Amino acid sequence: MSRRSDGQNAIASGAAEFPMSDPAAISLYELGESLAHGDCSSTDIVQALLDAIARKDGRIHAFLHVNAEEALSEARTADRRRAAGEPPRSPLDGLPVALKDNISARGQPCGCASRILDGYRATYDATVVARLRAAGAILLGRTNMDEFAMGSSTENSAFGPTRNPWDTDRVPGGSSGGSAAAVAAHMVPAALGSDTGGSIRQPASFCGVVGLKPTYGRVSRYGLVAFASSLDQIGPLACDTRDAARVLATIAGPDPMDGTCVDVPVPDYEAALRDVERLDGLRIGLPREYFAAGLDAEVERAVRDAADCLAALGAELVEVNLPHTPYAVATYYLIATAEASTNLARFDGVRYGHRVEGADPIEMYLRTRAAGFGPEVKRRMILGAFALSTGYYDAYYLRAQKVRTLIRHDFEAAFARCDVLLGPVAPTPAFRLGEKLADPLAMYLEDILTIPVNLAGICALAVPCGRTAAGLPIGAQIIGPAFEEGRILRIGAALEQARGPFRGAPTL
């Protein structure tokens, strides 16, 4: 079931001809060049994408809400600016981007794929949305997700799962699965997601697109509905590293509305991508723990091939240790659930969203949360409340914070020996829908290779590096020190250039 409504007639009635066969298979950069040369208009691009959504999304269910009329209006405004000779506001001017359903955009639904926020519309723009609007980007729609970003498969959405465009019997990953699937299925060239424990990188890997988790504090979280406040970070999913760099440059930077957003300069990320022919002098660490037992053989082969490819460009491969990696999942699920139990206490049926009436306020509160939250959200809130309860705080939550410090120290020691780390994004390719729903622990272990990055607060990039024999995408994870997004983007671009393009799923 979907809660899409606005603008469906506008989608269905679109008949514009786009001069290129599949606009979302074309990068933001290429679309921008086409606009600059007068080969097409913003209205052409938006209408073609709306037509693509109408054709494809019934099978994929990447979108929960489509801003058809608003997007076309914004496109026409961008075209008028261009016709009047105004310079582009930014490289994203007149180009469409999608938003994950936990990022506030004024006047649009912001439901976190949950019944408890059904009918709620945001009253303000998130900082990232305000920056996209100022850059002239067009907000095409809102993408499906695991409820309140809690999941690794986008099967926990209250409005039904998203399917992987490469194989619709498989998951797209989560929790930003809708954003990844929308890009991979050529329904939008770029989208924003959020990453708490791998929720951008893992779906990017499963769907064969690029996903960037910025350093904690690089991008404002103001307007992002919080899951775990010390771990959440907004980032882009895109066709390639250049597009990811352009989106990150637009949304990054200090923000007085977010006290955790760090006041450090935002570099020219695209400039970092210009020198990718050779990687001489670069040291790439291969963490032993990321190639341990349990890693799918095809995933390991593809990632090691990617490492060899980078070595052929002049990089030096170095084996390193991250010894506390085996404790990362337990550490994460204590910290994340504890923070979630606190953050989600505000959803009580009193101020906004869904309400189930009761005989008194307590009964109303209990009925509302019982009806509004799904089973995974309830499970994590209970775990978090237990970890924070009297008598258990020191034994669980405080100890988890101490292990978090050890994990951060592991990365610091590794980066003393190398410039970046390279490993798999996930232990397996995309798994089948329903395969792990009955086993929460198996689902949690999907994030074992991405969680440490969030605990350490550093940056990481997922970039396609191969496919399985069955044709499923495999992603490599490039991990960098804090605020070195340019470095990991450069290495991702070098891998893209050496391996050739990987532009989304086959046409549906």
Image (spheres, rainbow, N blue to C red):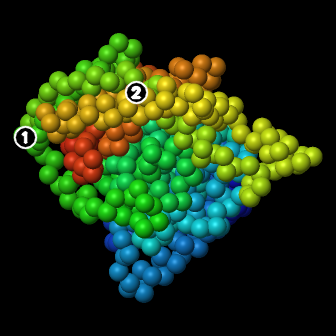
Q: Position of residue 3 (x, y in %)?
A: 72, 50
Residue that appears at 70% across and 49% down: 347
Residue type at mark 1 is Asp
Residue that appears at 37% across and 54% down: 217
Q: Could you tell whether 378 is left or right of 279 in the image?
A: right
Is residue 331 shown above or below 6?
A: above
Quarter residue 38 falls in = bottom left
Q: Nearer the viewer, mark 1 or mark 2?
A: 2
Q: Could you say whether the residue bearing mark 2 is in a helix, strand or loop?
A: helix
Q: Position of residue 286 (x, y in %)?
A: 22, 27
Where is mark 1, residue-wise? 280
Is residue 322 shown above or below 293?
A: below
Q: Could you say whether the residue bearing mark 1 is in a helix, strand or loop?
A: loop
Q: Position of residue 212 (x, y in %)?
A: 37, 46
Give the distance between the C-alpha atoms of the residues marked 1 and 2, in whole angstroms: 33 Å
Where is mark 2, residue-wise? 328
Outermost residue on the top side: it is: 293
Residue that appears at 35% across and 80% down: 87
